[in-house]
Structures are given as C-alpha cells and as structure tokens.
Image (cartoon, rainbow, N blue to C red):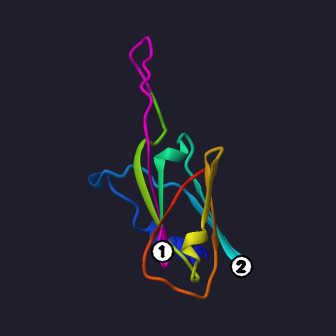
Amino acid sequence: MNNLLEQFTSNLPNSGDGLTFMPSAEIDETEQEIHLKLEVPGMQADDLEIEVMDDSVSIKGERKSETKSEENGKFRSEFHYGKFERLIPMPSSIAKDQVVAEYKDGVLKLTIPKTEETKKESVKIPVS
C-alpha cells in the first residue's frame, strides 16, 4: 500500500500548473473493501469532486482563501489555498457504483467495495 501511494507523491504539482497543494492521503485495504482518507480541512463537501475509474480514484477540489488584514498592514499565513488534484491508483478491482464518500471534520473518507468484475467507464460520486 505504501509503495502505491508513494508512486504518485513524486509528481507533486509545481506552481506553473495552477495547483497549489497536495492533500495527505491514507489507504487501507481489507478483504471486502478499500478505505481511502484525504486531509482537506477548511473546505465544504461541495468544493470536492470525486471520480472513480476502473483502476484509480480522482479527487479534485479548491480551498478558497479568506481575506484578512491586520491594522499594521502585515499578514502572515502558512495555510495552502487553491486547487488540488489527487489520482490514487486502486490495488484491486472495485465496484465503482457502490463507493460511499463522507466529509467530516476536514477529512474525506471513501469506502470502496472490491469486486472481481471490471467495467470500462468512470462514475461520479456525490459527497455527503
């Protein structure tokens, strides 16, 4: 599992493509399903777009900045704002139409049932 996630961390976005941060991901696999979690604090469920393909899950979103100003004209923020996109490869065949997504307390959780059957189209998943 670790190697699967590490394959895609070497392709971190640069400032030239409009993507500004890469949310951390965690993946766990049981015999029946795959559990995928992403840290995306400061967002709403409507800010996230999830698409499930035959062999991967794509998660896109945008964290919008809040404008703040200080009285002395100085402001410092270590928060990352802007667009992100993660493409997470799946280690097994999955039931794309049975994926459940939940967003709570800044963590997006996907429960992805496994299947032996493979289809060739992607499915959009609503976030609750």
Which residue is farthest right?
31
For the residue pair 127 and 15, the one nearer the viewer reads as: 127
The first of marks 1 and 2 along the sequence is: 1
Q: Is residue 66 magenta?
A: yes
Residue 7: mark in rendering: 1
**Left or right of 75, for residue 43:** right
User: Residue at point 61% right, 76% down?
Assistant: 1
Splitting the image into 4 quarters, where does residue 70 fall? top left
Q: Position of residue 9 (x, y in %)?
A: 47, 66
Magenta stretch? 52-75
User: Residue at point 39% right, 67% down?
Assistant: 11
Q: Position of residue 37 (x, y in %)?
A: 62, 60
Instruction: Measure the C-alpha gap from mark 1 to mark 2.
Output: 24 Å
**Left or right of 91, for residue 17:** left
Which residue is farthest bottom?
116
Q: Position of residue 115 (x, y in %)?
A: 62, 83
Which residue is farthest front?
97
For the residue pair 119 and 52, the one nearer the viewer reads as: 119
Crowd rating for badge 2 (residues with CA inside 10 Å; few <14, some 14–19, many 20+): few
User: Residue at point 56% right, 77% down?
Assistant: 3
Which residue is farthest left?
16
User: Residue at point 50% right, 45% down?
Assistant: 46
Per the picture, the main secondary structure of the magenta-coloured stretch is loop
Number of residue marks: 2
| Number of the front mark, 1 or 2 | 2
Crowd rating for badge 1 (residues with CA inside 10 Å; few <14, some 14–19, many 20+): few
**Left or right of 125, for residue 12:** left
Q: Label 2 belongs to which residue?
A: 32
Q: Amino acid at mark 2?
A: Gln
Question: In the displayed structure, would residue 70 be above or below residue 46?
Answer: above
